[in-house]
Image: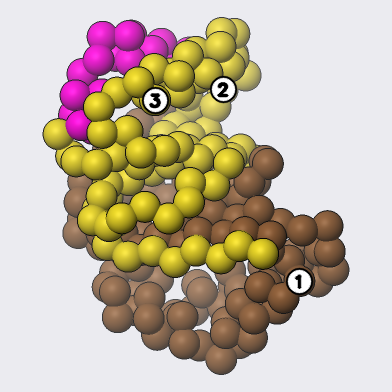
Chain colours: A yellow, B brown
Amino acid sequence: MIVETLKPPYFAVIFSTLVTDNLKCYQETAERMEALAKQQNGFLGIESARSTIGITVSYWQNEADIITWKNNIEHTEARNLGREKWYKQYQLRICKVEREYGFKK
Amino acid sequence: MIVETLKPPYFAVIFSTLVTDNLKCYQETAERMEALAKQQNGFLGIESARSTIGITVSYWQNEADIITWKNNIEHTEARNLGREKWYKQYQLRICKVEREYGFKK
C-alpha cells in the first residue's frame, strides 16, 4: 500500500527491476526480504508495483540504516541470488526525500 | 523501461497512487502527461509500474524544473481531474538522488 506522509528529511531507496524467466523462489525471497526489512532499525515503509518493470521504494530514517540493511547477511545472499538468477537488469537509487504531499479522498 | 545510470546529484519525483473505479480518460491522460513531461526542460527519464498501487518515478535535473512542470497548465488541469475523478489516494515525494548503482546482464 501507499506509505502515508512521513516527516522529511528521510531517505528513499528506489529499486527498479527487470526480471528473467527463471523466477524460482523469487516471490518467497521477495516476501522474506520485505518482512526482514521491516524489522530493521530506521525502516519507515515500503511500496511496490510491477508491470513490465518492477519498482520497489523503501523508506528509511538515515543513510546509515540503509547501509546496515545492505550489509545484512541474509539480504546479501538474496542479492547474490538475484544477480545470478532473477534479474536481467536493475537500478538502485539512494535519495534524500526533501518534501512530500499527500491526497486522500 | 528502467532509466539507466544518470549522474547524481539530480532529482526524483516518486508518485504513488491508488485509483478509483472511475478511470474514464485516465489512460489517455497519463500517456499525454508522460509525452508532455518528456518535452520539459530538465526531464531525464520516467519509470512506471502498477499492481495494487501505481508507482511512477520521474527524474529531473533540478528542483526548478520540477516546479516548472508542476505549474504547466495542461499538467495542472490533469492533476485537478485526477483529484476529482481518478485518485482515491496519492503521495508525491520530491527527492534528491545522491548515489546509484546499476546491474545489467
Viewer-side residue, A102 vs B86: A102
Q: How dense is the environment of label 2, judged by Cα within 10 Å: few (below 14), some, or many (20 and up)?
A: few
For the point 64% across and 81% down, the residue is: B80
Q: Which residue is mark 1?
A: B85
x and y, in percent, of residue B38 in the image: 50, 72
x and y, in percent, of residue A47 in the image: 50, 40
Q: CA distance from mark 3 to mark 2?
A: 26 Å
User: Is residue A69 on the magenta stretch?
Assistant: yes
Q: Which chain letter matches label 3?
A: A
- Tell me if residue A67 comes above or below residue B69 in the rendering: above
Element under disc 3: helix
- Tell me if residue B6 comes above or below residue A50 in the rendering: below
Give the residues in magenta.
A65-85
Q: Answer yes or no: is residue A80 visible.
A: no
Q: Amino acid at mark 1?
A: Lys
Element under disc 1: helix
Q: CA distance from mark 1 to mark 2?
A: 37 Å
Q: Amino acid at mark 2?
A: Thr
Determine the main secondary structure of the stretch shown in magenta.
helix
> Is residue B98 left or right of B17 when viewed as pictured?
left
Q: Which residue is mark 3?
A: A38
Disc number for residue A20: 2
